[in-house]
Image: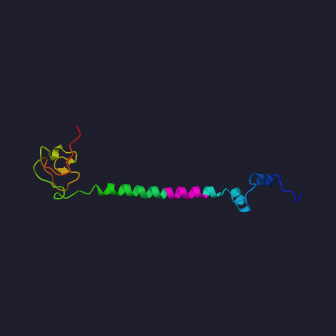
């Protein structure tokens, strides 16, 4: 009996027949090469998603910075019927989401976007 393999050992040998000893031992421990690559792949994908998410969020934060009036070509009078109080970016009583400083409701700038009807 000492030299004969136990039933449990025989079953393992049959399941992993054809593999070398190292891969067979790793498989018994649950450490397959396939699992290692899967874990690495998930880690790389996670890092990639974090980087992409950061890149997407960075411009969103930069968009909250207001532009100086001169750069927006702001003027205190309307242009062709377009006025700040008719713009989607206008914040009553005298502010704008994109242009810094006090904004006249009857003013105009190059960022004019009509309010949705």
Residue 98 point in image, percent of width and height: 23, 53
Instruction: Please name the residue shown 60% across and 58% down the image.
Output: 36
Tell which residue pokes out farthest to the front in this image.
Answer: 18
Residue 78 point in image, percent of width and height: 11, 47
Magenta span: 36-45
Q: Between 7 and 40, which is closer to the camera in this rendering?
A: 40
Residue 110 point in image, percent of width and height: 18, 52
Q: Quadrant of the N terminus?
A: bottom right
> Which colour style is shown?
rainbow
Does residue 115 appear left or right of residue 45 in this picture? left
Tell which residue pokes out farthest to the bottom in this image.
Answer: 22
Instruction: Please name the residue shown 43% across and 58% down the image.
Output: 51
Report the predominant secondary structure element of the magenta stretch: helix
Tell which residue pokes out farthest to the left in this image.
Answer: 77
Instruction: Please name the residue shown 48% across and 59% down the image.
Output: 47
Q: Quick check: is 7 in the magenta stretch?
A: no
Residue 31 point in image, percent of width and height: 65, 58
């Amino acid at each position: 009996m000492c030299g004969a393999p136990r039933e449990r050992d025989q079953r393992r040998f049959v399941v992993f027949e054809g593999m070398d000893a190292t891969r067979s031992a790793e498989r018994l421990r649950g450490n397959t090469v396939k699992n290692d690559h899967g874990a690495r792949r998930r880690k790389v994908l996670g890092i990639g998603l974090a980087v992409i998410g950061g890149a997407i969020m960075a411009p969103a934060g930069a968009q909250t910075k207001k532009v100086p009036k001169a750069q927006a070509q702001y003027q205190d009078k309307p242009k062709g019927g377009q006025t700040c109080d008719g713009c989607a970016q206008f914040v009553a009583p005298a502010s704008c989401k994109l242009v810094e400083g006090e904004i006249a409701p009857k003013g105009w700038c190059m960022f004019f976007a009509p309010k949705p009807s």
